[in-house]
Amino acid sequence: MGKIIGICNQKGGVGKTTSAINLSTYVAAKGYKTLLVDSDPQANATSGLGLDKKAQTKNVYDLLMGLASVEEVKVQGPLENLFILPSNVALTGAEIELVDTEQREFKMKQVLSAARDQFDFIFIDCPPSIGLLTLNCLVAADKVLIPLQCEYYSLEGISQLMETIALVKSGLNRQLETAGIVLTMADFRTKLTSDVISEVRGFFKEKVFETVIPRSIRISEAPGFGKPLLLYDETSLGAQKYESLAEEFLKREVGEAGSVAKIPHEIVLIESPEDEIQLAEESNVLQANDLEEEKTFNNTTVDQ
């Protein structure tokens, strides 16, 4: 039976969707059959994996409203073991329409229970808010993974999130646990980043992943091309850090890190020779700047 991991933080702009996309991609690349559920009406996880969110005739809204099954909504991702349940703006209406529905907090759990046996891991990209959609995700999840930006306001927000998780665990999902906290968007040129990391590690101890995700040009660029880092620039620092996070996550969950299989050319989303030329040009630009970015990161982390 697959594990359901909710990736959640009610504060926006903390790297939540980026972490959902890249963690699920690397877990899939290591041989685990993986489903990414986009439960955010902004549908950034959908477009971040190269899907046109406006073109999806069936999406998570249809699942929650009982209008479609997982098999009808499921879309093949860019890797053989990666699938996605896409979203679009229609999901915004679900929170309103579900208000008067019986067992409204359990809709996502009911939907995903039938799919658990088909996947090793199901990752849910939660909305950046504490509403009915997020509550559904927490009730459905076995564990919560929390991306935490290395900024002061993130420290204030996490206390509210931990209270919400505790309330859900006490009343709606007694099996809910914390999978861990991922420190994201770290800028080691600032003392604040080091202070936040020290404070978070001091309070949450072993719950905090060792891997720290840095601020990175490649991480910011990849969604615009509709690709996870593994397919956009697998040699970049950001890609290396997300692979390290996936290995650490798998060690916690299954006791082994696994290794990324060489990605067969045919499952990379290339549709024409023109696309190959474009990819080659992009690669040249990336390689021209990547060494400088990694050098900067390494220099600023020497004293950490």
Image: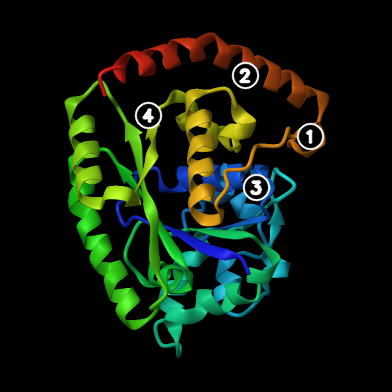
> Real-space Cα distance between discs 1 and 3?
13 Å
Distance between the alpha carbons at the discs numbered 1 and 2:
20 Å
Q: Say which of marks 1 and 4 sits in front.
A: 1
The percent position of residue 37, horizontal first and vertical second, equals: 56, 60
Q: Nearer the viewer, mark 4 or mark 3?
A: 3
Q: CA distance from mark 4 to mark 3?
A: 24 Å
Give the residue pinned by disc 4. Answer: 215
Q: Amino acid at mark 1?
A: Pro
Image coordinates for residue 191, horizontal then vertical, percent: 18, 26
Q: Decide if residue 118 is on the left or right side of residue 61.
A: right
Q: Secondary structure at mark 4?
A: loop
Local secondary structure at mark 2: helix
Percent of width and height locating residue 181:
35, 49
**265, above or below 28, in the image:** above
* N-terminal label among 4 and 3: 3
Q: CA distance from mark 1 to mark 4?
A: 29 Å
Quarter the C terminus occupies: top left
Which residue matches tag 1?
Answer: 264
Position of the N terminus, as image quadrant, is: bottom right
Sequence order check, earlier mark of 1 and 3: 3
**What residue would you read off at disc 3?**
28
Under mark 4, the amino acid is Arg
- The disc, 2 or 4, on the residue closer to the chain's N-terminal end is 4
Label 1: few (<14), some (14–19) or many (≥20) C-alpha neighbours in 10 Å: few
Between 287 and 280, the one nearer to me in the picture: 287
Q: Nearer the viewer, residue 16 or 223?
A: 16
Q: Earlier in the sequence, mark 2 or mark 3?
A: 3
